[in-house]
Amino acid sequence: MDIKALRQEFIKLYGDGDDIREYLSPGRVNLIGEHIDYNGGCVFPCALSFGTFAVARKREDRIVKFATTNFDLKVEVNLEEALVYVEEHDWTNYPKGVIKELMGKGHEVGGYEVLISGNIPNGAGLSSSASLEVLTGVIVNDLYNLGEDMVELVKLSQKAENLFVGVNCGIMDQFAVGMGKEDHAILLNCDTLQYAYAPLKLQGAKLIIGNTNKRRGLADSKYNERRSECEAALADLQIECDINALCDLNMDEFEAKKHLITSNIARNRAEHAVAENARVLEAVDKLKDGDIARFGELMNASHDSLKDLYEVTGVELDTMVEEARKVAGTIGSRMTGAGFGGCTISIVKEDAVDTFIEEVGKNYEARTGLKPAFYVAEVGQGARVL
């Protein structure tokens, strides 16, 4: 639904009036650097051109009215009462958490009514939750002139997901959503929040997102288990290594010290983290040099590591990547996101895009029984007032 149509729906729902405002918060995809945001590594995401639209208007009371075109559920909350997680409130728990964080900073937040429409496939791993959280921060910040900068809204959005929703996510998703820049990816150190933009020049190739349509929920995935395995590996390494995170080590240092990790599983997890961080840094350099072929090889190596060492891919993602790599014009293909379903990201030569979508779609469905969806991704701006 475009923003004009959404505005008309808002007026139908809430009535006409002054100062109706419009907002957009994108989805995101991570090009390379998976499961290292919580291990002190660098990631390389970009914002997408599609995402979550909102139309909102300030109210004179302290009632917040949530509605969306995506689901029937509408929720009202009174900010005079404590904001708490309520399972029946479903998707509105994400914005509620962000409002709670803003109020916790001492901001005077009043009521508003909002109608939201997202075109990020829910559960696909393109960060519909982070998009909704940062969108809420932008809306409240704008309506009530709170004066928070985007990096602070990003941090508060992550905190809301950790503490209010109860998902122990890193900051990459919210950062990419909030700080995205058109035609650029972001090299981000998730520990220090140091970042740099890198132009995304693919020289006659396109980014294709493949949705396996195998839904995944971050909270009930193996995400927290993987984090604890990495923490165990780090604790073992710290017996001899003066490090704060696994990605403080380079591969040579890791090879010399990996015997300290007592669990084979934890050693595999740590090896993925250290090697993936090295791949990210090389990938950014290769992109700057225009070496798209090597960038694709690094994407392939990333997926293989996530499959064999980190064990977060699953049949559907592996099948889609296998089929993608069979197409002659595919430069590189990997899973993206937390895994266990969700999406792949592939770099495909422009003249092979139609063949890729047809062949991968047909063969993936024949092998899994699931009908996939594909998006030729355009790299967009971060969350903003329209």
Image (cartoon, rainbow, N blue to C red):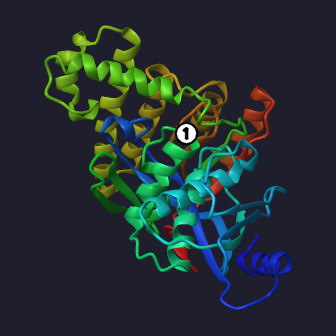
Q: Position of residue 91 (x, y in %)?
A: 69, 51
Q: Which residue is mark 1?
A: 166
**Left or right, 105 with reference to 83:** left
Q: Which quarter shows the N terminus?
A: bottom right
Displayed quadrant of residue 272: top left
Q: Position of residue 172 (x, y in %)?
A: 43, 49
Q: Which quarter shows the C terminus?
A: bottom right
**Left or right, 301 with reference to 96:** left
**Left or right, 74 with reference to 55:** right
Where is 33 relative to 91, above or below? Answer: above
- Residue extending farthest bottom: 18
Q: Residue at x 53, y 41 (%)?
A: 337
Residue 266 visible in the shown view: yes
Q: Residue at x 86, y 79 (%)?
A: 12
Viewer-proximal residue among 215 and 370: 215
Displayed quadrant of residue 147: bottom left
| Kind of residue at badge 1 | Gly
Viewer-proximal residue among 176 and 63: 63
Residue 184 visible in the shown view: no
- Label 1: few (<14), some (14–19) or many (≥20) C-alpha neighbours in 10 Å: few
Where is 249 relative to 259, above or below? Answer: below
Q: Position of residue 324 (x, y in %)?
A: 61, 38
- Residue extending farthest front: 80
Q: Secondary structure at mark 1?
A: loop
**Left or right, 40 with reference to 384:** left
Viewer-proximal residue among 212 and 3: 3
Q: Residue at x 62, y 32 (%)?
A: 317
Q: Position of residue 210 (x, y in %)?
A: 64, 45
Looking at the rendered structure, the number of numbered marks drawn on it comes to 1
